[in-house]
C-alpha cells in the first residue's frame, strides 16, 4: 500500500454521506425484490442478489445492514425492517449447532439492537431488552459447544468437522464474549459450568499459534503475517498436522479475506481486554501480548502485500498474479484478465487497521495503521468500488466468494469474476462507515460490547 498520511476522518465526510444515500437504496431494493423463500442473499449475479447454499451465514448481515442504516440516518423505516426481521426470521440461527458463524448472524442483529438500546438510540423496553439478551446468551453457548481440545489449547471447529480450525471464527468469536458479559456460561455434562470467556480466549490463542506466521522459522514458507484459512488437527491425539484452505489458493498462500478476519478479530479482542480490565487466570494472563503480536503481524502483512490503494487481490499466491507484473506498485485492477480482486477483504481489513491504529495511538505507534485504514476506506467509498448504479443491488463492487469452486459471476466478455457484491462485504462496509460516522459525530467508539461492560 501507499498510505495517504494526509487523510482525516473529516475529509471523508462527503464520501460517507454519499455512501449512506446509496446504502439505503440498496437495502430497499433487496427488501422489495429478493425472494426469501430461496434462502438468504449471498452475492450478486448481474447486479441482483442471489443465494448459494453452503451454510446459512449471511442472513444476519441483511437485517443488520438495515439497523446500521438506521443508526447512521435515523430513518425509522430501516429500524422497523431490521427489528421485525430479527424477531421473525433469525430464531433458527440461535440454535444452529452446525456452523461456526454465530457471531456473524446474531451479533449483527440481536447484538446491534441491544447495543442501540443501551446507547439510547432506540427506546428502552424491558421485555424487548430481555429478548435480545436471551438470544445472545443462547447463541454464545451454542457456538462454544463446537469445541475440540488439542495439546496446549482448543478451538471452535468449523463446519468441516472437529479437525478443522477456520481463521474466520476470529471475528465470529465475539458472540462468546458478549454472552459471557451477560453473565452466561455453557453447561456441560454433570452440570459442569464452562466459561465462555475462557473458551473465546483459548480459541484466539490457538488461532494465533497455528494460523498465523511470525517470521520465526516455523517452516519453509514462514513469512511474518502470512495467515492460513484452515488449520488441520489430528483429533485422536490433539496434534497439529498442517495448514489448509477452503476458499484460498493453498495452505501456504494467504487468502486475503481470511487475513482480514484475523486483523479485525484480534483488534476487537484487544479493545475488549483493554476496556474490560478482567483478571485472567495465569494460563491466559499474557493474552493481550499474544493478540497484539498477531494483530500487528497480520496488519503489516496486509499493508505490504496489497496494491497501493489498499484493495487486495483474493489470494496473495493466486497463480495468475505473476502475469500482472508488480501489482504492489500500482492501484488494484478489478478488470484485469488474470485474478479477481476481493473488495470484501478490504471492507473487513480496513476496520482492523483503524482499530489497531487507535489502540496503539493515532499520533504515535498506531499512526501507520490508522492512516492505512483511512486509505483503504477512501478507496472503497469511491469508483470503481462504490456501486452507484440504481439497478445494481450491491453496495461495494468486485467482491469474490469462492474462486476455487468457480461460484462467482463472470460477466460476458470477461475472463474473471468482477463487478459483483457480497452480503458480508456490504455489511462490513456499513460497519466501517458506522465506525467513521461515530467519529465524525463525536460519539464514543463503536464496539460490539458497548453497554455490556
Image (cartoon, helix red, strand yellow):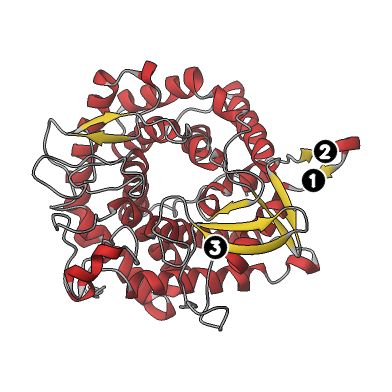
Q: Earlier in the sequence, mark 1 or mark 3?
A: 1
Drawn side of residue 193 relative to residue 74, left or right: right
Image label count: 3
Residue 115: tell me if it is visible.
Answer: no
Q: Which residue is mark 2?
A: 188
Q: Is residue 355 left or right of residue 18?
A: right
Which residue is at a point 47% across and 74% down the rendered structure image?
297
Foreground disc of the pair 2, 1: 2
Q: Position of residue 64 (x, y in %)?
A: 41, 34
Q: Nearer the viewer, mark 3 or mark 2?
A: 3
Which residue is at 64% across, 40% downward?
143
Q: Position of residue 256 (x, y in %)?
A: 38, 60
Q: Please give the residue where the numbered disc 1 appears in the rendered image.
A: 194
Disc 3 residue crowd, few under 14, some 14–19, many 20+, Cα 10 Å: many
Residue with the mark numbered 3: 243
Quadrant location of the N terminus? bottom left
Q: Real-space Cα distance between discs 1 and 3? A: 29 Å
Dot 2 and dot 1 residues touching (CB under 8 Å): yes
**Residue at the image position 59 percent from the left and 29 percent from the top:** 94
Q: Residues within 10 Å of mark 2 (few under 14, many from 20)?
A: few
In this orientation, which residue lies closer to the viewer: 403 or 434? 403
Q: Residues within 10 Å of mark 1 (few under 14, many from 20)?
A: some
* SS at mark 3 in the image: strand
Q: Earlier in the sequence, mark 2 or mark 1?
A: 2
Residue 396, by quadrant, is: top left
Element type at mark 1 = strand
Amino acid at each position: 500500500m501507499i498510505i495517504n498520511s494526509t487523510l482525516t476522518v473529516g475529509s471523508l465526510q462527503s464520501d460517507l454521506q454519499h455512501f449512506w444515500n446509496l446504502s439505503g437504496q440498496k437495502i430497499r431494493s433487496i427488501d422489495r425484490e429478493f425472494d426469501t423463500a430461496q434462502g438468504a442473499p449471498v452475492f450478486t449475479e448481474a447486479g441482483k442478489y442471489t443465494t448459494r447454499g453452503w451454510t446459512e451465514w449471511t442472513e444476519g448481515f441483511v437485517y443488520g445492514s438495515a439497523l446500521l442504516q438506521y443508526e447512521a440516518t435515523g430513518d425509522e423505516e430501516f429500524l422497523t425492517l431490521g427489528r421485525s426481521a430479527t424477531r421473525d426470521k433469525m430464531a433458527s440461527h440461535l440454535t444452529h449447532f452446525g456452523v461456526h458463524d454465530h457471531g456473524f448472524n446474531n451479533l449483527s442483529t440481536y447484538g446491534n439492537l441491544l447495543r442501540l438500546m443501551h446507547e439510547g438510540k432506540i427506546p428502552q423496553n424491558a421485555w424487548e431488552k430481555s429478548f435480545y439478551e436471551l438470544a445472545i446468551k443462547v447463541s454464545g453457548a451454542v457456538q462454544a459447544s463446537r469445541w475440540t481440545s488439542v495439546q496446549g489449547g482448543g478451538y471452535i471447529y468449523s463446519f468441516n468437522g472437529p479437525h478443522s480450525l477456520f481463521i474466520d471464527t476470529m471475528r465470529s468469536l465475539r458472540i462468546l464474549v458478549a454472552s459471557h458479559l451477560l453473565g452466561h456460561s455453557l453447561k456441560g455434562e454433570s452440570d459442569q459450568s464452562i466459561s465462555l470467556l475462557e473458551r473465546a480466549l483459548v480459541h484466539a490463542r490457538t488461532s494465533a499459534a497455528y494460523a498465523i506466521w511470525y517470521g520465526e522459522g516455523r517452516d519453509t514458507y514462514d513469512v511474518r503475517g502470512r495467515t492460513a484459512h484452515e488449520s488441520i488437527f489430528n483429533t485422536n491425539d490433539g496434534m497439529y498436522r498442517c495448514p489448509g484452505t477452503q476458499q484460498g489458493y493453498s495452505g501456504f498462500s494467504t487468502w486475503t479475506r481470511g487475513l482480514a478476519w484475523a486483523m479485525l478479530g484480534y483488534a476487537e479482542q484487544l479493545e475488549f481486554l483493554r476496556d474490560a480490565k478482567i483478571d485472567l487466570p495465569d494460563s491466559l494472563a499474557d493474552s493481550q501480548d499474544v493478540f497484539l503480536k498477531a494483530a500487528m503481524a497480520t496488519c503489516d502483512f496486509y499493508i505490504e502485500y496489497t496494491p497501493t490503494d489498499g484493495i487486495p487481490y483474493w489470494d496473495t499466491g493466486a497463480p495468475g498474479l505473476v502475469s500482472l507484473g508488480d501489482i504492489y506498485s500500482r492501484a488494484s485492477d478489478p478488470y484485469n484478465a488474470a485474478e479477481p480482486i476481493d473488495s470484501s477483504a478490504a471492507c473487513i481489513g480496513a476496520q482492523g487497521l483503524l482499530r489497531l491504529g487507535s489502540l496503539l495511538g493515532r499520533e504515535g505507534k498506531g499512526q501507520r495503521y490508522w492512516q492505512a485504514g483511512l486509505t483503504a476506506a477512501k478507496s472503497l467509498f469511491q469508483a470503481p468500488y462504490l456501486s452507484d448504479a440504481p439497478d445494481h443491488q450491491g453496495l461495494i463492487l468486485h467482491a469474490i466468494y469462492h474462486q476455487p469452486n468457480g461460484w462467482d459471476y463472470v460477466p460476458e466478455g470477461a475472463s474473471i469474476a468482477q463487478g459483483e457484491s457480497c452480503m458480508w462485504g456490504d455489511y462490513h462496509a456499513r460497519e466501517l462507515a458506522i465506525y467513521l460516522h461515530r467519529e465524525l459525530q463525536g460519539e464514543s467508539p463503536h464496539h460490539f460490547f458497548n453497554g455490556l461492560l
